[in-house]
Amino acid sequence: MLKKWNPSRLILPNWICAAAAAILIIYGAISTDIYIRQVLSMIGINYILAAGLNLLFGHTGQISIGQAGFYALGAYTASILETKLAVPFFAAWPVAVILTGGIAFLLGQRILKLHGHYLAMATIAFGMIIESLSTNWIEVTNGHAGVYVRSKTLLGSFLSSNLFALVVLFAALAFIISNNIEYSRVGRAIRAVRENEDAATSVGIVHSKYKVIMFILGAAFSAVGGIMYAHLNGIITPEVFNLAQSQTILIIVVVGGIGSNIGVLLGAIVITTLPEFLYGFADYNILVYGLLVILMQLFCPKGLIGMAESLGRLLKKTAGGT
């Protein structure tokens, strides 16, 4: 029998997400604080990356530590098409997402037959292969010199000056897609797969199909994040897409709350802003993140969303008592 699944009580409706996105876009349009907009943009990009991993890890239970590989594919494909082949951005961006999704489909057909640490090792290997290609295929990627992305030339003055709005729009879209998947027929199927593959198969759910679908969607999300990062940062180099980046994406999901969409958003906010308060420990970010994950797993295994729910129950109980 399948275990009963209890969805998070902190569900952010799509219309609230859309309203929050609109407020942020208006803020970005009137604000002159470039630093704040940059931090908010990176929160949005990290949320997109983590939301993609959460579709796979949080809902099917399949761990991937190679999301930075898809992140790199999206960034490099779009940037190279735009800068070296003069492909317009409105064509280059869909091509980058489709190519990344196609590679995810071919890869997922094979490696998703693995489980546990075997799958984790396979995804790490994929990420390392992409990092090696971006480093050594100098004729295409320029190696450590990087690919310069002049957004104003490629996108025009209006879009280049409103990249913050684009990031917010894509992050909101990622949230809405994740929400709709989570509470759809597909969402119920993948949760059944996560809880018990054999039981899911016995009722006619083809678990391999749903795993591959989530793997492709996660890769597509990462590609979008890569495209936004390339245009926001102005240059991409292999160091950005290393194993540490994949680990950071995983940490966001774990700290926020595995399987919770709003939890992943909270995780993206905390993990993105934390380094801004730890300048003196810039070389030890992964160590700090590791300690944070250990503490969360020891004292709050459901992540930040679990803490929020516990606090909500406590407040409700206190209010009821008075």
Image (spheres, rainbow, N blue to C red):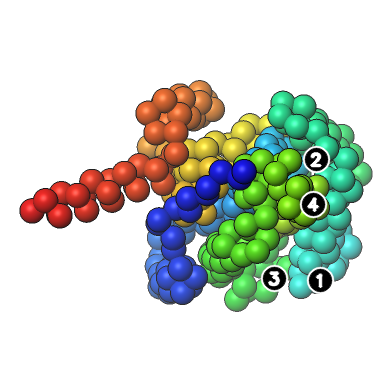
Labels 2 and 4: the sequence-earlier one: 2
C-alpha separation, residue under disc 3 versus residue under disc 4: 43 Å
The quadrant where residue 302 appears: top left
Which residue is disc 2 drawn over? 112
| Callouts 2 and 4 close, C-beta under 8 Å | no
Between residue 206 and residue 288, name the one nearer to us. Answer: 206
The quarter holding residue 167 reads: bottom right
Q: Is residue 29 visible?
A: no
Whether pointer 1 and pointer 4 mark residues with C-beta atoms closer than 8 Å, the reply is: no
Residue under label 3, please give it. Answer: 155
Q: CA distance from mark 1 to mark 4?
A: 34 Å
Side of 255 where 144 appears, left or right = right
Instruction: Give the residue pinned by disc 4.
Output: 206
Q: What is the CA distance from the residue labelled 2 to the residue labelled 3?
A: 37 Å
Sequence-wise, the earlier of marks 1 and 4 is 1
Q: Amino acid at mark 4?
A: Val
Q: Residue at x 81, y 71 (%)?
A: 91
Residue under label 1 = 91
Judged from this view, the residue extending furthest toward the right is 139
Q: Nearer the viewer, residue 152 or 292?
A: 292
Q: Residues within 10 Å of mark 3 (few under 14, many from 20)?
A: some
